[in-house]
Image (cartoon, rainbow, N blue to C red):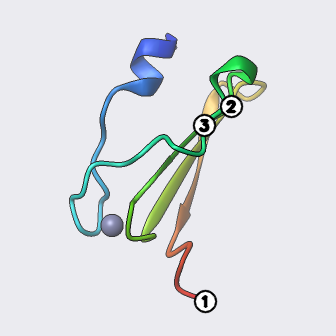
Amino acid sequence: MSLLNILKQEKCPVCKETLTTDKSNILFSHVIKACPIGHYEKEFIPSLEGYVEHYNVAAK
Ligand SMILES: [Zn+2]
């Protein structure tokens, strides 16, 4: 999976807002895409070459 593919814009599955990558650290290939409202967060794990998804990250 290329980095460009990782960084392409995606939508929150709940509210359809564009996910932000503010929490990402590209230097360490650590990419977190998050809903600006906090419904959803998607974290790329380079060692797994896959994503871990979290829902309702702000609903606590
Ligand atoms: Zn959302």
Q: Identify the image quadrant of residue 17.
A: bottom left
Q: Does label 2 point to a residue whose CB lies under 8 Å from ligand 1?
A: no
> Is 50 placed left or right of 36 in the picture?
right
* Residue beneath disc 2: 30
Up-down relation of residue 47 to residue 32 (above or below): above
Up-down relation of residue 31 to residue 37 (above or below): above
* Residue beneath disc 3: 24
> Is 24 placed left or right of 19 in the picture?
right
Residue 13: % across, % down: 30, 60
Say which label, 3 or 1, has the lower sequence index: 3
Are circles 3 and 1 on residues that touch, CB within 8 Å? no
Which amino acid type is marked by label 3? Ser
> Is 50 placed left or right of 45 in the picture?
left
Which amino acid type is marked by label 1? Lys
Up-down relation of residue 23 to residue 27 (above or below): below
Name the mark on residue 60. 1
Are circles 2 and 3 on residues that touch, CB within 8 Å? yes
Q: Identify the image quadrant of residue 10.
A: top left
- Crowd class of label 1 (few under 14; some 14 to 19; many from 20; radius 10 Å): few
**Residue at image location 36% in from the left, 48% down from the top:** 19
Outermost residue toward the front in this view: 22
Which amino acid type is marked by label 2? His
At mark 2, the secondary structure is loop
Q: Disc 2 and disc 3: Cα gap in Å?
A: 6 Å
Assign the C terminus to one quadrant of the image: bottom right
Up-down relation of residue 11 to residue 30 (above or below): below
Residue 49: % across, % down: 65, 24
- Crowd class of label 3 (few under 14; some 14 to 19; many from 20; radius 10 Å): some
Are circles 2 and 1 on residues that touch, CB within 8 Å? no
Residue 44: % across, % down: 61, 35
Say which label, 2 or 1, has the lower sequence index: 2
